[in-house]
Amino acid sequence: MKKRVVITGLGIAAPNGVGIPEFTNAIKNGISGIRHDAQLAELQFSCQIAGQPQISEELKSQYFTELELRGFNSTGILYGVIAGLEAWKNAGLPINETPDWDSGTIFGSGTSGIEKFRESIYKIDDLQTRRLGSTVVAQTMNSGVSAYLGGKIGLGNQVTTNSSACTTGTEAILMAYDRIQSGQAKRILAGSTSDSGPYIWAGFDALRVCSSKYNKNPEEGSRPMSNSACGFVPGSGAGALVIEDLESALERNAVIYAEILGGNVNSGGQRDGGSMTAPNSIAVQKCIKDAVLNANVDPNEIDAINGHLTATTKDSLEIENWTKALERNGADFPYINSLKSLTGHCLSASGSIESVASVLQLHEGFLFGNLNSSDLHPEISALIDSSKVPQRTININPKIIAKASFGFGDVNACILFKKFEK
């Protein structure tokens, strides 16, 4: 018998809410976290709006000591530690004095400490290598976020960082699921994070895939599935989930937010129309089909989809791939929403932040609305009924939500969450 795997803790540092209460209120009420970014304007970016968590100095001091904050400027690690520790506390778990051999973390990132890298490069070029400080390596190594979390909590099981572009967060949750189901851990703190700032976002601006028409109306800038979509809005932050063996969760009488039924990760091999930046539709459909098969559910049981849906030209293709993979269309299609309308595209953090949102919808019995999508793209309305793209929060008490992420490098991940029933 395979072990049942559940979610017992949630944490978030998102552009529209830091902490689960604020974030839940934001997604229920359509509160956007996309704002004008003065630094992007100063640097003459085409896109001058972004989604970035609002972190006060007071909040930082609740998670880091004064000594740790000296010379610290890795936003990705900051967001990841805040989200991760909130999830751990939310799960009712202790900070350990000795290593907890049953608990670990798989916490993904795209890059780490890009601002610290920049600062270090200038110092090295100015012949000041000895003034770099003692935390440069910890802040800039890709596994810095998991190392910080492992040390702050006292994790003795696997402590690692994965990195798969925009699929990173969803992949991390599935990696945690696999490790727990195989009996190698009782619980894993899973999630992902993404740094903020122009040195992360510049490449996308140069690719001309970012929104540039709404610089004076930031909250209207991210328009997934919309006919007037003009590119994604860059974002950042972190999401975290405590993934746990059901038996362990019941033993300690933990709150159970949802169950993970299964999922799938694959790649299109950059073949059949796939490229470094475009998906292979055959692989996307196979990923969804194999996830549904692995979860042992009928496609008709899926109540809602939390899509990748970035507000680019590929949104219509994504919807088409869902219709083919599930063999459902028109009014028979599940409800679908995109968190990116409220947060922007949080890159390597997107999968985990959106998974937290998916789990909250199951636990509290609602589906959040899609901001800025009232002018549904005609290619999408030809595939699915417009009523399946809610414009505001609806209370339908979903039982099963499919969450998917698709990333640069032609990589895909799909996971199925279920409202918990004993």
Image (spheres, grey):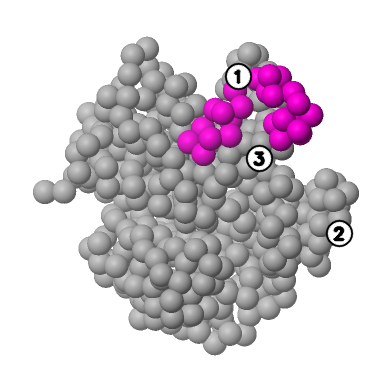
All told, the count of numbered labels is 3
The image position of residue 203, as x and y in percent, is: 69, 57
- Name which residue lies at 58% across and 85% down: 379
Q: Is residue 131 magenta?
A: yes
Range shown magenta: 120-144
Secondary structure under the numbered disc 3 in the rendered image: helix
Residue drawn where x is 67% and y is 49% of the image:
200
Identity, as a three-letter code, of the amino acid under mark 2: Lys
* Mark before the other along the chain sequence, 3 or 2: 3
Is 98 or 331 nearer to us in this picture?
A: 98
Q: Is residue 2 left or right of residue 286?
A: left
SS for callout 2? loop
Residue 304: image location, x then y, percent:
43, 65
**Residue 134: mark:** 1
Q: Quadrant of the C terminus?
A: top left
- Tell me the number on the disc at residue 114: 3
